[in-house]
Image (cartoon, rainbow, N blue to C red):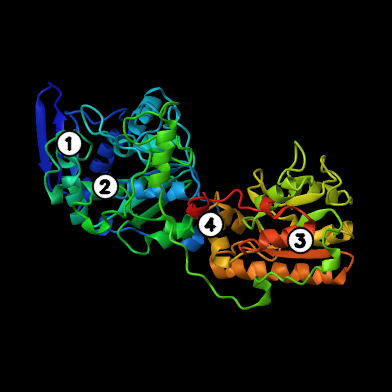
């Protein structure tokens, strides 16, 4: 059944109650169009309560991970789900993955719901008056006098006002959700006294009324996103044990970033001491979710709180690879050449394998070292590519060349959204262009490297999109594929250097406790110059 409460022409309230059937679909669609065109919450003269009989609205429809694993999902990510359906967990997940995420508040002074309303009322895009973020994980708010739901009242404005977005629609067991709403700071009472479209004032007191409202919202979201194909709708069950893996593969973020945050330990005593509370902005660390604002006087206190409450990641199980391509060789440099190796020293290792530590080590030893950037204008990889295209030695068009050390030569091409690796694409040109160079090849355990790649600013996703030599587009869906690629690169470097004996190849395991001493012996730099730099403290809190 559906229920209309309208005003008649003479201003007197009129009620009409009719059984729902196929003939009335157009009437309901027209009525929904009225709601879509509203510029604010439904007033008391115009309320719809649609009871949905189908139960497909209570189950998520998971999109295929393979469909999106090789392309970047559109941005921003906007959660259209309801409160107490894992918004804090989504917030922690994206922040753990290196994205900037907003939760409840979208700037220092205002809730997301408020800045969205102000933007739309001013005729601007829905988030124009909110701080910019990669993800908005809770946009509803307990504003006065009513609970504000932009995902309902301004759904069409959001979908049509953001050119391309990834929308989240979380699900959970209705009984569990009802209990959470009922037990969370009088939320059930606040919802019932508010006048929300689809949930008229006084409704929402029972499990059935809240479930019907949720179903109506799900079907409405599915319908409008379907009619606007530039967007992607991601549906997931927050109580499904596989959700972490699903979200991790879909967004290129470590599945161990997914967890339970902001839980009610009265309802879930088993999570007491294991759940986390988080600030309203993650990554940029602007302030806590509560009413305390971020000021110079409390900056240290807030940052300490953020560090204390940051999610703790469980390291993945170590994998035992017996092939020699996964182990650094210690006998490639005879002791007679220690402290006498030719220059330049060029790192042919992969990103997230100690490039910043290598750069710091040689800089500490008074070597001129380049890392990522080889000129004020160009990244090393970019000027190397330009040089080779003009039949010049790889570093010829790099303004700061020649340097003694090139610690990281790969780079992220933001224009083409590609990760470019000269150590794979230009390997032969590098070897032949510098016949007396010393090459570095770095190693680390594959599972830790894979975790670092997955948790470093969407690096995994970028690499999958880039069609790299030995790593074709759509490869890299799992640890095995990344490991195979690394192994093939090591074999290729070893074989090419062996064919050109004027070069030297230094292999180093960055996780070996003796790495500093070994590098010190070979290059004559104090072993104390070796350390861990540019680490992800979420994965390695012990090194923070």
State whether residue 12 appears in this view. Answer: yes
Which label number is shown at residue 521? 3
Label 1 vs label 4, nearer the camera: 4
Q: Nearer the viewer, residue 363 or 478?
A: 363
- Are the two marked residues, 2 and 1, in contact with CB atoms closer than 8 angstroms? no
Counting from the top left corner in percent of width and height, residue 179 is at: 17, 51
Which residue is depicted at the point 10% across and 41% down? 17
Name the residue that disc number 1 marks: 190
Name the residue that disc number 2 marks: 84
Say which element carries label 2.
loop
- How far is the residue under mark 2 from the one under mark 1? 14 Å
Label 3 vs label 2, nearer the camera: 3
Is residue 519 found left or right of 166 in the rendered image? right
Q: Which of 311 and 388 is in front in this view?
A: 311
- Decide which of tag 1 and tag 4 comes sooner along the chain: 1
Counting from the top left corner in percent of width and height, residue 305 is at: 39, 40
- How far is the residue under mark 1 from the one under mark 3? 69 Å
Name the residue that disc number 4 marks: 454
Q: Which of 484 and 54 is in front in this view?
A: 484
- Give the number of callouts: 4
State whether residue 348 appears in this view. Answer: no
Label 1 vs label 3, nearer the camera: 3
Is residue 28 found left or right of 286 in the rendered image? left
Label 4 vs label 3, nearer the camera: 3
Which label number is shown at residue 252? none
Label 2 vs label 4, nearer the camera: 4
Counting from the top left corner in percent of width and height, residue 126 is at: 41, 32
Say which element carries label 3.
helix
- Decide which of tag 4 and tag 3 comes sooner along the chain: 4
- Decide which of tag 2 and tag 1 comes sooner along the chain: 2
Q: Residues within 10 Å of mark 2 (few under 14, many from 20)?
A: many
Q: Which of 165 and 326 is in front in this view?
A: 326
């Amino acid at each position: 059944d559906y229920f209309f409460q309208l005003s008649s022409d003479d201003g007197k309230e009129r009620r009409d109650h009719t059984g729902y059937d196929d003939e009335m679909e157009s009437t309901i669609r027209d009525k929904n169009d009225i709601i879509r065109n509203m510029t604010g919450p439904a007033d008391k003269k115009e309320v719809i309560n649609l009871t949905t009989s189908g139960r497909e609205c209570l189950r998520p429809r998971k999109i295929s991970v393979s469909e999106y694993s090789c392309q970047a999902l559109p941005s921003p990510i906007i959660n259209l789900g309801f409160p107490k359906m894992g918004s804090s967990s989504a917030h922690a997940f994206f922040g753990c993955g290196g994205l900037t995420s907003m939760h409840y508040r979208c700037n220092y002074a205002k809730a997301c719901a408020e800045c969205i309303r102000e933007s739309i009322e001013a005729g601007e895009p829905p988030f124009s008056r909110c701080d910019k973020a990669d993800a908005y994980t809770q946009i509803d708010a307990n504003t006065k006098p009513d609970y504000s739901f932009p995902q309902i009242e301004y759904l069409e404005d959001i979908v049509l006002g953001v050119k391309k977005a990834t929308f989240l629609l979380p699900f959970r067991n209705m009984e569990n959700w009802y209990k959470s709403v009922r037990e969370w700071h009088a939320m059930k009472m606040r919802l019932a006294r508010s006048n929300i479209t689809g949930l008229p004032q006084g409704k929402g007191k029972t499990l059935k009324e809240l479930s019907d409202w949720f179903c109506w919202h799900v079907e409405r979201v599915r319908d409008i996103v379907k009619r606007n194909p530039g967007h992607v709708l991601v549906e997931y069950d927050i109580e499904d044990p596989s959700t972490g893996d699903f979200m991790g593969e879909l967004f290129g973020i470590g599945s161990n970033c997914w967890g339970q945050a902001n839980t009610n330990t009265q309802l879930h005593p088993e999570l007491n001491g294991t759940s986390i509370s988080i600030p309203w902005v993650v990554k940029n660390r602007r302030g806590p979710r509560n009413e305390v604002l971020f000021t110079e006087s409390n900056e240290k206190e807030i940052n300490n709180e953020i560090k204390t409450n940051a999610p703790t990641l469980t390291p993945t199980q170590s994998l035992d690879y017996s092939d020699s391509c996964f182990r650094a060789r210690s006998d490639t440099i005879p002791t007679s050449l220690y402290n006498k190796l030719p220059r330049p020293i060029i790192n042919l290792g992969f990103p997230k394998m100690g490039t910043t530590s290598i750069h710091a080590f040689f800089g500490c030893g008074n070597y001129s070292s380049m890392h990522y950037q080889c000129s004020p204008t160009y990244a090393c990889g970019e000027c190397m590519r330009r040089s080779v295209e003009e039949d010049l030695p790889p570093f010829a068009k790099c303004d700061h060349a020649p340097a003694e050390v090139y610690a990281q030569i790969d780079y992220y091409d933001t224009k083409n959204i590609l990760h470019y690796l000269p150590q794979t694409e230009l390997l032969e040109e590098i070897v032949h262009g510098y016949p007396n160079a010393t090459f570095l090849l770095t190693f680390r355990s594959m599972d830790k490297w894979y975790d670092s790649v997955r948790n470093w600013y969407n690096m995994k996703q970028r690499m999958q999109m880039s069609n790299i030599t030995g790593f074709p587009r759509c490869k890299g869906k799992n640890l095995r594929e990344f490991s195979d690629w690394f192994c093939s690169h090591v074999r290729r470097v070893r074989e090419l250097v062996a064919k050109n004996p004027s070069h030297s190849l230094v292999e180093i395991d960055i996780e070996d406790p003796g790495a500093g001493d070994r590098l010190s012996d070979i290059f004559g730099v104090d072993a104390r110059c070796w350390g861990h730099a540019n680490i992800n403290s979420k994965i390695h809190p012990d090194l923070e």
